[in-house]
Amino acid sequence: MLPKELNVEGQSVIVTGAARGIGRGIAEVLAEAGAKVLVTSLTDRYLKPFSDEMTKTGHPIETLTADATTSKGWDHTLEFALSRFGHVDALINNLGDAIMRPLVPLPDHPSREPISDDEYRKVLDVNLTEAFLGCRAVGSHFIDRRRGKVINISSQSARRGTPQTLVYSTAKAALVRLTQTLALEWAPYGITVNCIAPGSFPDPTTTGHDGYAEAEKDAKKRVPLGRVGNIREVGFLALYMISAASNYMTGETVYIDGGSSFN
């Protein structure tokens, strides 16, 4: 039997961008642990199949299509969560995406166009603005209750940038600083803010067999532990972070990448 401090049964959690990938792994684990989970996504392409799967396993989730990069989308999300749960205990800002382009044309990569203004803004919005807006939307609710848990999903790129991911790496690093600053701002109100920075976690349901096999092959050469991560492994860390067991932890970023970010 788990210690009571790790029990999250009945807690209500919002997880953004969680219809697939790391967010899906987080939502699965939390729902199986007894939390009431609201999963959001921009479209229902993967949302409904995921919801149907969870219902079949006996761990149903709430789902909502919403744009987490806009204030309007967040107003809708919070209103929906409160109507279903009555309150929110934890917020997990999981949205993320990258566009692989150089800042300016590179002689060694003549066919690759530099990143455009629109692409720059999109990458910032998806990786940083959505967390800023999510925290702002739910913050007053947490402060009124004098409790709440925030987890921002960053990336190993926050620790070490790689070529042609300038905007993505910058946004994920900024997310780490947002986490630290907000942790200090909200600490007097009993709210913790932490960050998880994953490495390679391909989702076998969306990458396909060949894509997953290629990621595994690459990991054997690049990752000290010699493998890719399982999306549920991030979920186990998130479970700890939203539980009472982590009540004395705030402002931290935990890298879960098999050692690859400092190799």
Image: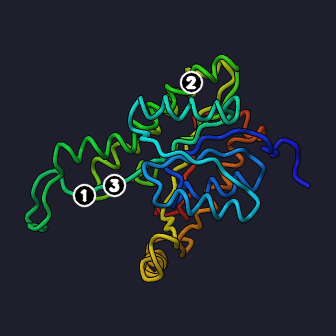
Callout 1: SS: loop
Q: Look at the image and tell me whether residue 153 can be seen.
A: no
Considering the image in quadrants, where does the N terminus appear? bottom right
The crowding category of the residue bearing disc 2, from other C-alpha atoms within 10 Å (few below 14, some 14 to 19, many at least 20), is some
On screen, residue 118 above or below 55: above
Label 3 neighbourhood size at 10 Å, few (<14), some (14-19), many (20+)? some
Q: How far apart are marks 2 and 1 (CA)?
A: 34 Å
Q: Is residue 244 left or right of residue 191?
A: right
The residue wearing badge 3 is 98
Q: Can residue 208 be seen in the rendering of this structure?
A: yes
- The answer to which of 64 and 69 lies nearer the viewer is 64
Viewer-side residue, 241 vs 44: 44
Q: Residue 256 carries which label?
A: none
* Of residues 22 and 169, the one drawn nearer to the viewer in this rendering: 22
Q: Position of residue 95 (x, y in %)?
A: 45, 47
The type of residue carrying mark 2 is Gly
Residue corresponding to mark 2: 139
Residue depicted at x 51% and y 30%: 135
Task: Decide which of tag 3 and tag 2 comes sooner along the chain.
Answer: 3
Callout 2 touching callout 1 (CB < 8 Å): no
The disc labelled 3 sits on which kind of residue?
Ala
Q: Residue type at mark 1: give it.
A: Gln
Disc number for residue 164: 1
Q: Marks 1 and 3: in contact by CB < 8 Å?
A: no
Residue at x 10%, y 68% (from the top left corner)? 111
| Secondary structure found at label 2 | helix
